[in-house]
Amino acid sequence: MSRSEEIKQLVAELDSDDTDVANEAEWALINQIGEDCLEELIAAAPAFADFGRLCASEVFRAVGDHRAVPVLAPWLEAENQTVRAWAADALGAIGSSEAVPHLQQAWRAAKNRGEAHDDSEQESIRSALTELGARSVVLPDTARSLSTEDEKLRTVWSAADARRAVELLAAASQVVYSVSFWERESVRGGWSWFAITDASVSAELDWTEPWDRLVATAAEQLMSGAVLDPSSLPPSACAALSWVDRSDL
């Protein structure tokens, strides 16, 4: 089998009904083929079903070529919310400014649908706009000084500093609505982050409440339990916080 035939087969397998096959094809395209698959993927991806679109979004994100924008942008209007969210993630990672108006339109549409500000789609859109310089993140210097930057998780804190980070963001009038904990593990000769799912926590919020009340309620809920107790987590665990500013609403 020639390389071009291999690429064509792998791209087709992204849209397989067998999700294991699709995931293996995604891995191969990202780690073994790279940008050489782009032309074939751009041609095939618009016809993919939902899971194939998710896999394609990950490949586009890894390749990072602006030529994928015309394929990903229409997926911001897909019926499936996860497809919309992953397309936004990919557009943010690609880093092309031509994606900005598409993302802004998708953000307005999500708000008009009355979707919660803490759902995955709005979070992905906000993150993408931030990556593209079209949205500013409020992060006080006191909280920033405790954080580090990670390529995948962006701004993170040690598990030991998670509670303090929530306090500092709330003091800056930010609604911190979730804290997820992650552990770094080796995978296929490299390293990757894995979520510690039983340690993560989200606040249950009524977004119609006054802003100051939202800030206080979110912080109280996140800090009220043992979930922010680092003693129950691996020493290498880190915390990723999700928060919004009043202007995001």
Image (cartoon, helix red, strand yellow):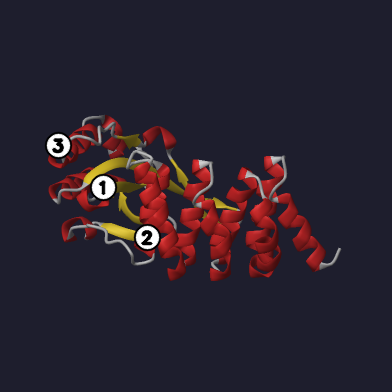
Of residues 27 and 229, the one nearer the viewer is: 27
**Residue 23 at x, y = what percent?**
65, 47
Is the residue under label 1 in contact with that under label 2 (CB below 8 Å)? no
Of residues 184 and 12, the one nearer the viewer is: 12
Residue shown at the point (47%, 48%) measured from the top left: 85
Residue shown at the point (57%, 52%) measured from the top left: 187
Q: CA distance from mark 3 to mark 2?
A: 27 Å
Quarter of the picture holding the N terminus: bottom right
Left or right relative to 130: residue 88? right
Residue 237 visible at all: no
Q: CA distance from mark 3 to mark 1?
A: 15 Å
Which is more N-terminal, label 1 or label 3? Answer: 3
**Residue 213's mark?**
3
Q: Look at label 2 and name its amino acid.
A: Leu
Q: Look at label 3 and name its amino acid.
A: Arg
Quadrant of the rendered image containing residue 181: top left
Left or right relative to 105: residue 213? left
Left or right relative to 230: residue 98? right
Q: Which residue is mark 1?
A: 249
Residue shown at the point (20%, 55%) measured from the top left: 143
**Residue 37 at x, y = what percent?**
69, 65
**Residue 129's mark?**
2
**Mark 1: few, some, or many residues within 10 Å (few <14, many ≥20)?**
few
**Mark 3: few, some, or many residues within 10 Å (few <14, many ≥20)?**
some
Of residues 194 and 34, the one nearer the viewer is: 34
Quadrant of the rendered image containing residue 59: bottom right
Q: Look at label 1 and name its amino acid.
A: Leu
Vertical placement of residue 177 versus 12, above or below: above
**Closer mark to the observer between disc 2 and disc 1:** 1
